[in-house]
Amino acid sequence: MKPSHHLDSSTVLAYAAGTLDEAFMIVSAAHLAMCPVCRKAVHEAEALGGELLARLDDTKISADCRARTLTALDQATLHRLPVPAPHSELPVPLVRLLNVTSFDDIAWKKKAPGVSMCDVRLPSYAKGQLKLLRIGSGRAMPEHGHGGEEITLVLKGAYIDHMGRFARGDVADLDEEIEHKPIVEQDGDCICLVATERPTRFKSLAARIMQPFVGI
């Protein structure tokens, strides 16, 4: 089944340009491994960028600019436009990052009844946070907003909120203006890969009190 929820056009352009923060780059790459529609969109954005560069006049660059560019290339950790991993439950970028091929091999930590999490370690220079989140069947997350940009990729199962049904391969590419209350479907756990710019903004007092302990 092809994903029905895709990356925002601004995220596609930023991915093609290589300007996304590390956590968002990883989630986007994982989605691209599962979504031919967004892979095509990135191809088109890269082709457009190449045409624009070809039209520019030759410009001399400083030694400092050249050094920064080479350093950024040395720090690059993702292959462009990854393809699906045929023998793995996880998309290629996560297999490479975590060195696991099964959800059972992930070092889950229980945070609350029906909620487990795994912090994905990023390079020291990276901004934002990257987490794997597993929520039990039928459970609802407290209603919340976001302190900044957030991209959630469904890796297994499905949840429903006011924006629709999000199943394997779907992404919720959200900003700080969106508030929602995801509810996991009854037929199994929902596992998501979540990149956040800033901590979640929970609406209820109880959720805000528990937030430092849960780590979401």
Image (spheres, rainbow, N blue to C red):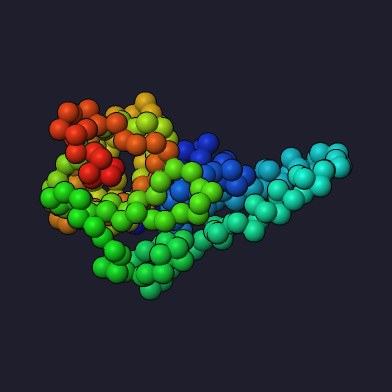
Q: Residue furthest bottom?
A: 87
Percent position of residue 105, x then y:
29, 69
**Residue at the image position 41 percent from the left and 32 percent from the top:** 148
Q: How many marks on residues?
A: 0
- 195 and 172: which is toward the camera: 195
* Residue at the (24%, 57%) spot, across then down: 109
Residue 63 pos. (x, y %): 81, 47
Q: In the image, 58: left or right of 177?
A: right
**Rendered location of residue 34, percent (x, y):** 42, 57
Query: Is residue 30 placed above or below 147 in the rendered structure?
Result: below
Q: Quadrant of the N terminus?
A: bottom left
- Write the residue at 67% across / 48% down: 47
Residue 78 lies in what quarter of the image? bottom right
Can residue 211 be seen from the camera position used here?
yes
Horizontal arrangement in the rendering, residue 91 relative to residue 83 (left or right):
left
- Report the front residue among 120 and 20: 120
**94 lies left or right of 67:** left
